[in-house]
Image (spheres, rainbow, N blue to C red):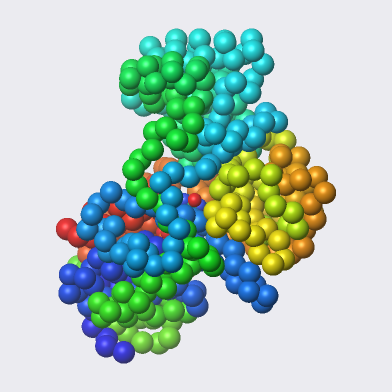
Amino acid sequence: MNNSFDDVIVGAGIAGIVAGLVKAKQGRRVLLVDSAHVAGGLMKSMHTEEGYVFDYGTHLLSELAIEELDDLLFSEVRKGDWLQFDYLKSGHYIKGVLGEKSPVVDAGTMDLANYYKGLYELVETVSQRSSSYGNLIEQLNCTFGSTITNQLIAPAVEKLFYEPASNLAPDSHLLFGLARVQGFSAESVRILKQFEPLNEALAFRSHHEGKTGQTRFYPSTGGIGQWVNILLEKLSGFGAQVLLGTQIESLGVENGIVNELTLSNGEQVQCNSLTWTVPLFGLLRLLPIELAKPIEPLKFLDSYLVHLIVDRAPITDLHYYCNYDPAFSHFRTTLYSNMQSKGDELGYRATVEVFRPNDSDSSKPTGDSILKELIDCGVFPSNSKVVYEKAELLKNSFPIPTINFRKMQSDQLYIAKKYIKNIELFGKARGDIFFMNDVIVDVYENATR
Ligand SMILES: Cc1cc2nc3c(=O)[nH]c(=O)nc-3n(C[C@H](O)[C@H](O)[C@H](O)COP(=O)(O)OP(=O)(O)OC[C@H]3O[C@@H](n4cnc5c(N)ncnc54)[C@H](O)[C@@H]3O)c2cc1C
């Protein structure tokens, strides 16, 4: 292996791969290092011995409305055997109702008295909006009013994070798509949304409205992991090297500049710049500094991905929905047969996400218990059976953005940047940007400079 690089990038998830592509395309000598034996991070697919495929994190790709970046990431996908969608059939489940027209929670699932009271308060609270809030519950009350907050949003947030909303930092609800609610008629919403404070709290009544114009992609057969193979091939075409099953053992730092890294395979490499896309805790432990307070790892939720094959077809045509109802343990269900318009020989594949608090000892969810929930939610018919199941535990999946988490995160970012001048932090290293497209755009905008 060549031992001298312009950029060493730690982590070959989507953040590291895109950083590598952007840098290597500029002619820079790039090395990507990942501790796992397969690249892609959460952008991967799991293949069963029988040949069935299930995805991990993000399922659908979405154009980013930046021409150069879309060409870099999607030119092969656009030409290949991929399905293209101009909108997603996404729904939600709350208060015992599967909403199939929009992913946004529907205030109409409350009883009529609370519905009218809730919408009145939502309009009335416009005068209480502020540019900053002390915690999430304060923000929710000032955005939606107390009825919608207490009946819909706070119970959903608390189910998902296992934390009281008063412990969570403002904007935590955005991580689970709880920015807005549905209410009023479709016509009234169009008029009300012209007033910015109401636009921020109210959603259109259907997933057909408010389309972004960006195309979404999913392979017509197989899983989303194919995209990583396309990107890795491109990366290698630009001359970048990828080293899997490897970690950074130590850093050589001179006057705040990292210029040498020792890898876990014993090799030493020289670099002009370090890009860190994995949790900062691992980097800070390598710094040759004494800190007043020891650094603690940030807390993330653990997630079970329950991959199922069910013998009957789903009775909804949704591509996916999110379950905000505290009566159910699962969050998102993705229905592959609805995306690919066909089942498999054995049945109909689904991946169901179930969260657990960090390092909890709660038991693994079983396929039967999860299918029962899906039947109760009106997703599969009542006589369905599980014909295949596999539950995988993803450690450290979603951040638990308590007020303390945000403080520790900003302290860790401060220390990393104070002691290393030639470092760039993306993806998991930042902790404040979560969704894949936001991660990609952040990398593109900063790594191209
Ligand atoms: C269950 C789940 C569902 C999600 N669904 C969506 C979705 O629908 N839409 C969306 O936009 N986003 C979704 N996300 C978020 C999305 O997965 C992230 O935006 C994306 O994975 C971020 O990419 P990354 O490269 O920062 O991190 P990761 O994908 O986590 O990749 C990090 C990589 O770093 C490697 N690594 C870790 N530690 C080290 C180390 N010390 N040394 C070397 N390598 C290391 C890992 O092996 C991994 O390959 C979801 C996340 C989860 C957990």
Coordinates of residue 7 in the picture (x, y in percent):
25, 72
Coordinates of residue 134 in the picture (x, y in percent):
43, 27
The one of 123 and 272 positioned closer to us in this rendering: 123
Tell me which residue sits at (29%, 57%) in the image.
Answer: 70
Above or below, 209 relative to 30: above
Coordinates of residue 427 in the picture (x, y in percent):
38, 57
Answer yes or no: is residue 273 visible: no
**Image quadrant containing the C terminus:** bottom left
**Image quadrant containing the N terminus:** bottom left
In the image, farthest residue toward the bottom: 1
The one of 268 and 330 positioned closer to us in this rendering: 330
**Side of 449 where 72 appears, left or right:** right
Tell me which residue sits at (56%, 48%) in the image.
Answer: 319
Q: Quadrant of residue 343?
A: bottom right
Q: Count of labels shown?
A: 0
Above or below, 198 relative to 238: above
Above or below, 16 relative to 240: above
Answer yes or no: is residue 368 visible: yes
The one of 241 and 99 positioned closer to us in this rendering: 99
In the image, farthest residue toward the front: 341
Tell me which residue sits at (39%, 33%) in the image.
Answer: 210
Coordinates of residue 181 in the picture (x, y in percent):
50, 26
Tell me which residue sits at (21%, 70%) in the image.
Answer: 25
**Side of 114 where 291 appears, left or right:** left
